[in-house]
Amino acid sequence: MRTRLKVVNGRQYYYLEESIRLEKPVVYSVFLGKRIPAKKELEAKKEGLLAKMYGSLLAGAERLFLSREQLVEAEKLRRRYVQKVRKLGKVARDEREEVDAVNFVYTTLTTEGVPITREDANLAYKFDRKNVKNLRDENLRVALDMIKGLRFVKEGKKGLTLDFLARLHGIIMAQYGERAPGEFRSKQAYIYLKSYQRAEEIGFRPPAHQEVTKKLRELVEWYNANEGTLNAIELAALLHLRFYMIHPFEDGNKRVSRLLLNKALFDKGYPLLNISKDSRSYFDALITAVERRDEKAFVQFVYEQFIARK
């Protein structure tokens, strides 16, 4: 923000301005008066200008943990991304989508211990339905299923249902028949931190299996009620975190969580976010937020990952 002097009919007036380069340059301003006000009053004017920008750029979307300034910055990045993509030709857009999808699948699976390479993920992306039967490598089939899952969330309708969650899990875990793909767990779940020495249970235990359907129904209702009002960053982060804390499936919960995070972003017109690109920081943020029941910390982590998105 900057102060600007304007001369109107020979008289001097000051304005507080912010210029944003979006689809086209836009200038937001508030009137200061014949002089630049004192620090306290100027800060109030800055807040007023920020509120004006927030209302214009985000239509006054609700927020819980992030500041208006943070969300304005995220929205600016989103719009610049959309504008940049629109200028690309179809071939370039398809290539960009392929690179993003391959990177997402590669990091999502390798953080879960699936021994694939980036080239494996790229190869899986290129397979279509008519020649899938020729894939004999199990890891490639797992990668292909993740790509199917990503397309499923990207191309699906807005909103969530219990059936959607079960189908998504069934798609991405199709190669793990012994782990009940598409079915909610029937026993207690435990979350462990693993090291080369031992596996240690974290300081949080998901709800009993008898509560899973009820907890998921509440999550679905929350998401559908807030999808049209809560800002995209917080909506996505909270959906990921709350789903993960329910841990509704025997296996694959983190994979589904990251896909759901991106569904929330897709539903709001945001690009794909590869949140586990730095696996250590991702797991640290997730487990810390789960153990401390600290939603704000995880929301802040997701925001920082989006701002740092390349």
Image (cartoon, rainbow, N blue to C red):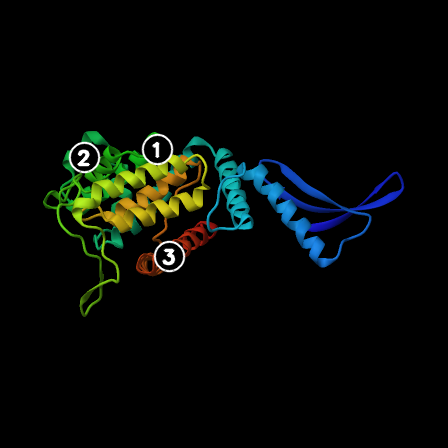
Q: Where residue 218 sits in the image (x, y, percent)?
A: 30, 40
Q: Where residue 213 sits in the image (x, y, percent)?
A: 21, 40
Compared across the picture, whether 89 is left or right of 72 comes to left
Residue that extends furthest to the right in the rendered view of this protein: 10
**Secondary structure found at label 1:** loop
Quickly name the residue at label 2.
132
Q: Where residue 37 sits in the image (x, y, percent)?
A: 76, 54
Compared across the picture, whether 21 is left or right of 253 comes to right
Which comes sooner in the sequence, label 3 or label 1? 1
For badge 3, the amino acid type reads Asp
108 or 35: nearer the viewer = 35
Q: In the image, which is nearer the foreground, mark 3 or mark 1? A: 3
Mark 1 to mark 2 CA distance (whole Å): 30 Å
260 or 137: nearer the viewer = 260
45 or 307: nearer the viewer = 45
- Which numbered disc covers residue 294? 3
- Residue 296 in view: yes
- Which numbered disc covers residue 159? 1
Disc 2 residue crowd, few under 14, some 14–19, many 20+, Cα 10 Å: few
Point 10% across, 45% down: residue: 178
Disc 3 residue crowd, few under 14, some 14–19, many 20+, Cα 10 Å: some
Q: Where residue 89 sits in the image (x, y, percent)?
A: 46, 32
Q: Are marks 1 and 2 in contact (CB under 8 Å)?
A: no
